Amino acid sequence: MTTKRNSFLALTLTLLAASASAQTVIEATDELEFDEPESWAMKYYASLALLTGMGVPEAMGAGKIDLGFEGGFVPQLSEEQRRVGFGGVKVEDLNRTPFFGRIRGRIGLSESASLELAYLPPIEIDGTKPHMFSVAVGRPFDAGESWKIGVRGYGHFGSISGDITCSAEELEGSNPFDCVAPSNDDLAQRAFGVEVTTGYVSSSPLRPYVGFAVNYLDLEFQIDALHSGVHDRTLQLTDGATVYLTGGATYAAGEKWRFTGELFYSWLSVVRPPETESGNDGLFNFRFLVSYRIR
């Protein structure tokens, strides 16, 4: 009996090895236009991670340190918006979480300039794991007795990995593209931008502001999926410019605490089949920041 069991196991392993060796591996690089459906999905989630100023940069003074938590709401996409795979044919499982959060800090470099740092740790949420760093340098300028203008340069880099092309949910459903196992995809993000804000500053603790920014996004989506009888290792590349507007207010609760609420909107171009001309399907969300001056 043991000999038959060992023989069966050896035969099974041999067949699996032969199947793996015969499997077609796709190793291709696709350079996508910035308004293709796949590009739209990549820049949508890159825009969520952009490090906005959450107000006019403050002349906090050299050596001062603020530490805080930033949160934001992630709009849930419709089925039409999630139809981005294979050039706008396949519906992807993109609605993973309605909320994101990260640690954020600010350090006074001089009497006027400050350095901002933010970190989104690799905590897995519904099969996806983000890991991102952000940095910014900014300073305010006087524009009258009660108005200030702020200028910031910022950037972020990192990735979101997970079962995006072939999700675990898709394997349990209709599975129209014959996914064999959850994929191990990776969306790499590199973003740089310049933001200008202006706000009203007075003796009141409430400080409203508006902002405008131009960004350059350099994005890569590495597919690693078993579907339709192939091992898909296609690398998708896209890059281009976006703009966003912000508006909100900061409430200074004494010398230490700051509470900021902000509305964010970014214009995002896309061509969805069967359309042939580019249209706008932008990102609108609400963000907040709670910070405390530790020194």
Image (tube, rainbow, N blue to C red):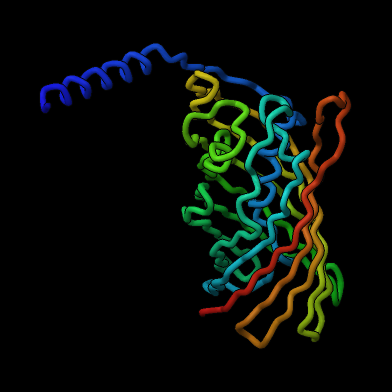
Residue at point 55% right, 59% down?
118
Looking at the image, residue 209 sits to the left or right of residue 258; the answer is right
Q: Is residue 279 above or below residue 159?
A: above
Looking at the image, residue 97 sits to the left or right of residue 231; the answer is right
Looking at the image, residue 164 sits to the left or right of residue 12; the answer is right
Q: Exactly how many numbered labels are in the figure? A: 0
On the question of residue 187 being in view, the answer is no
Closest to the observer, 159 or 192 = 159
Q: Is residue 67 above or below residue 233?
A: below
Task: Classify residue 150 by image quadrant.
Answer: bottom right
Residue at point 62% right, 28% down?
176
Closest to the observer, 77 or 210 = 77
**Image coordinates for residue 105, horizontal then vertical, percent:** 55, 66
**Image coordinates for residue 135, horizontal then vertical, percent:** 57, 54
Q: Is residue 107 above or below residue 76?
A: below
**Image coordinates for residue 216, horizontal then vertical, percent:** 69, 39
Residue at point 85% right, 76% down?
146
On the question of residue 128 being in view, the answer is yes
**Image coordinates for residue 51, horizontal then vertical, percent:** 65, 55
Q: Where the N terminus falls, by quadrant?
A: top left
Residue at point 78% right, 72% down?
249
Name of the residue lying farthest toward the top = 22
